[in-house]
């Protein structure tokens, strides 16, 4: 399938109550906020959405909630990866039935595919369960431990997975990303997934990106993209530096995801905390987090959506 996703696609958090249960009532407000910030799409139940920490039933409900809230105003990509290929297949079929615009999948990561052809075979099963939807392979070896050259994957999967649309590329290997972008004159939709290196991805030809920090800093990234398009590289580098500092701050007091949810609470979107095995954001660090954000000049961007 032809490339179709461009711009900033937010890897959305899954809103939760204090006890860790789903807070689906917040989903419409979250989607409206993201729309107003200039987001071009939403990526549901990925790493940022704690998809692998949700039950299969919860994942279906979350996907349905975001699809309903989006109401065809922006594309919804549902992440269906699971250690069980059969469960991934069922999640794919559900996403198609629920009205998703595309699906994506991580590989199984407990019993890992040992050879590239096994990975392709696995993705064929998952993608084929939603044959009408574009399918994106979700490449994030830092979490899955599954490492194959993605240019080789495209060459092997192009003829084997009929609805393959591209790759969500969450690995800081720009040379490999560029090889995928250039293959067959850019036939496949390559979505960059490392927020702190977006400018580098733009430089090699990225047209779209999926990121967690887009939840709160979309205006900053849009300014960076605009500066790059006008060849104002000095401004573009300055905006990227602010992003890099934000990513650094997110790792100071807790896991980046717990900190991201804490930041969202600071700007009026209380999406709760994270689930085990991730650790909750320490309340005692909230003041330090706010000071760090203010010191870095980030509050003006966080409040501009």
Image (tube, grey):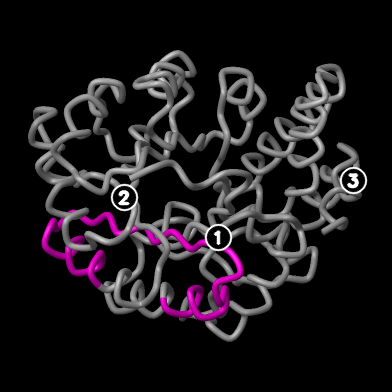
- Pointer 1 or 2: first along the chain: 1
Residue reaching furthest to the bottom: 25
Q: Quadrant of the N terminus?
A: top left
Against 259, residue 238 (above or below) is above
Whole-percent x and y of residue 74?
58, 64
- Pointer 1 or 3: first along the chain: 1
Q: CA distance from mark 1 to mark 2?
A: 19 Å
Residue on which the image places disc 3 = 294
**Pointers 1 and 3 in contact (C-beta within 8 Å):** no
In screen coordinates, is 159 left or right of 201? left
Residue 83 included in the magenta stretch of the image: yes
Q: Secondary structure at mark 3?
A: helix
Q: Residues within 10 Å of mark 1 (few under 14, many from 20)?
A: many
Q: Which residues are magenta?
A: 64-93
Q: Residues within 10 Å of mark 2 (few under 14, many from 20)?
A: many
Residue on which the image places disc 1 = 12
Whole-percent x and y of residue 210?
54, 45
- Pointer 2 or 3: first along the chain: 2
Residue on which the image places disc 2 = 135
């Amino acid at each position: 399938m032809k490339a179709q996703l461009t711009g900033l696609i937010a890897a959305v958090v899954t809103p939760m109550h204090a006890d860790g249960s789903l807070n689906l009532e917040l989903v419409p407000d979250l989607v409206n906020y993201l729309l107003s910030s200039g987001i071009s799409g939403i990526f549901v139940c990925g790493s940022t959405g704690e998809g692998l920490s949700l039950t299969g039933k919860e994942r279906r409900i979350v996907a349905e909630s975001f699809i309903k809230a989006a109401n065809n105003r922006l594309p919804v990509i549902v992440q269906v990866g699971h250690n069980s290929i059969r469960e991934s297949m069922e999640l794919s079929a559900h996403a198609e039935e629920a009205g998703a615009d595309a699906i994506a999948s991580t590989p199984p990561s407990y019993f890992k595919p040992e050879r590239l052809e096994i990975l392709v075979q696995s993705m064929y099963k998952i993608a084929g369960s939603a044959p009408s939807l574009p399918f994106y392979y979700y490449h994030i070896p830092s979490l899955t431990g599954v490492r194959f050259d993605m240019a080789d994957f495209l060459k092997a999967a192009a003829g084997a997975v009929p609805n393959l649309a591209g790759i969500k590329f969450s690995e800081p290997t720009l040379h490999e990303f560029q090889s995928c972008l250039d293959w067959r004159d850019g036939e496949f939709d390559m979505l960059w997934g490392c927020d702190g290196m977006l400018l580098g991805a733009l430089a090699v030809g990225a047209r779209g990106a999926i990121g967690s920090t887009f939840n709160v800093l979309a205006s900053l990234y849009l300014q960076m993209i605009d500066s790059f398009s006008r060849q104002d590289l000095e401004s573009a580098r300055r905006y990227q530096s602010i992003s890099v500092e934000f990513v650094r701050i997110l790792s100071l007091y807790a896991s980046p995801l717990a900190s991201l949810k804490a930041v969202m609470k600071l700007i009026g979107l209380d999406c709760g905390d994270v689930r085990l095995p991730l650790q909750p954001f320490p309340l005692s660090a909230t003041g330090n987090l706010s000071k760090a954000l203010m010191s870095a000049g980030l509050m003006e961007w966080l409040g501009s959506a």
